Image: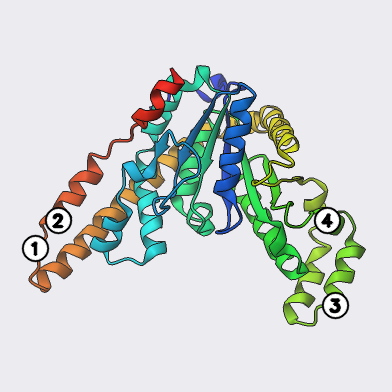
């Protein structure tokens, strides 16, 4: 567990900087992870990666800590009778209850790291609105400079209504996490993001685009766009291409600026709120374990009624209670 200090003694180092990558499925989030691992590594920065998506089949980047090594998503789905999204959420919730183990691993590596990149599920609501997302964000924020990177598919934002939907989502994530925030307009190799910058900087431009839409949603978006002006004014955003690497330098600078903002604006807040955050985090962890136990009881009762064996469920429960998070052996040597 991370070292306990009183709120007045809370000291958060300037590095490593944690970048939490959040984005909808297909936004190119994991590809951008790969691009930044390559770029930062080529500039002699020490990069550490964590994958929090239990259902992903293949990763384009080398991963140091992988949720798939600790939680079997398919077993969770099978034994609890869940759909894909429910199984992803349950798997992430279980992993989050043991997140202190991740902090312990990171603490041993922190002195030699510059960045920690964390990939999250493409089912964005699983991380942003679940208890696990809050547990992980709070645990990281009181330990390292933590930045949220929201990855947006630029090509999908050609329609102003879709753009507004993305920005409203970005706004909700910002106020939910209460951490320095960066929007990365990805895939600028497909379509430049200049028009999006115009829409954010000029209310009239966005209004003109929305006026060409006739749906009720377009009318609603137009009425809300004026209220979003202040959000846009203070929003840190860059255009990037995960495929070509365009915008990588601007992305890296934006992350560094966000890390400075974290030290100047967020650390004083965390000093005041640390004890409250820790208590809420512990309460959330305990609640997730209670939810797991209740789920186990329901599954066992159903199997008993069906005359099926509950041995597999007992083994799953034992695996969860004894869940151990470890580094990937094939990348530990590279860090030493």
**Up-down: is 138 above or below 212?**
above
Ranked by sequence position, the earlier of labels 4 and 2 is 4
In three-dimensional space, the C-alpha distance between marks 3 and 4, rounded to whole angstroms, equals 18 Å
Query: Which residue is at a point 80% across and 57% down the rendered structure image?
Result: 196
Residue identifier under label 1: 309
In three-dimensional space, the C-alpha distance between marks 1 and 2, rounded to whole angstroms, equals 7 Å
Query: Which residue is at a point 38% across and 64% down the rendered structure image?
Result: 84
Q: Nearer the viewer, residue 245 or 323?
A: 245
Q: Quadrant location of residue 260?
A: top right
In three-dimensional space, the C-alpha distance between marks 1 and 3, rounded to whole angstroms, equals 61 Å
Q: Give the quadrant of the C terminus.
A: top left
Residue identifier under label 4: 200
Ranked by sequence position, the earlier of labels 3 and 4 is 4
Residue identifier under label 2: 312
Residue identifier under label 3: 212
CB under 8 Å between callouts 1 and 2?
Answer: yes
In the displayed structure image, the side of residue 264 where residue 49 appears, left or right:
left
């Amino acid at each position: 567990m991370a070292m306990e200090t009183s709120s007045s003694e809370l000291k958060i180092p300037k590095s490593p900087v944690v970048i939490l990558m959040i984005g909808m499925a297909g936004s190119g989030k994991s590809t951008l992870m790969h691009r930044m691992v390559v770029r930062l590594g080529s500039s002699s920065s020490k990069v550490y990666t964590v994958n929090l998506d239990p259902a992903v089949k293949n990763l384009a980047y080398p991963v140091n800590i992988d949720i798939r090594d600790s939680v079997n998503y398919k077993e969770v789905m099978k034994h609890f009778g869940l759909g894909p999204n429910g199984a992803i959420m349950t798997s992430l919730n279980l992993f989050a209850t043991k997140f202190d183990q991740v902090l312990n691993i990171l603490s041993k590596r922190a002195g030699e790291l510059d960045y920690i990149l964390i990939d999250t599920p493409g089912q964005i609501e699983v991380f942003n609105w679940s208890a696990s997302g809050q547990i992980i964000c709070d645990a990281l924020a009181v330990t390292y400079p933590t930045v949220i990177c929201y990855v947006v598919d630029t090509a999908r934002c050609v329609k102003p209504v879709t753009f507004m939907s993305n920005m409203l989502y970005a706004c909700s994530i910002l106020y939910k996490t209460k951490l320095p925030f960066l929007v990365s307009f990805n895939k600028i190799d497909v379509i430049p993001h200049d028009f999006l910058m115009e829409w954010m900087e000029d209310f009239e431009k966005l209004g003109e685009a929305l006026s060409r839409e006739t749906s009720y949603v377009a009318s609603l978006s137009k009425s809300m766009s004026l209220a979003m002006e202040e959000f846009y004014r203070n929003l840190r955003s860059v255009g990037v291409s995960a495929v070509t690497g365009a915008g990588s330098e601007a992305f890296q600078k934006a992350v560094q600026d966000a890390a400075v903002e974290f030290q100047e604006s967020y650390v004083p807040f965390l000093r005041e709120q640390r004890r409250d955050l820790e208590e809420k985090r512990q309460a959330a962890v305990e609640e997730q374990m209670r939810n797991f136990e209740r789920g186990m009881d329901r599954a066992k009762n159903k199997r008993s009624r069906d005359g099926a064996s509950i041995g597999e469920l007992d083994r799953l429960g034992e695996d969860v209670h004894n869940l151990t998070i470890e580094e990937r052996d094939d990348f530990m040597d590279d860090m030493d």
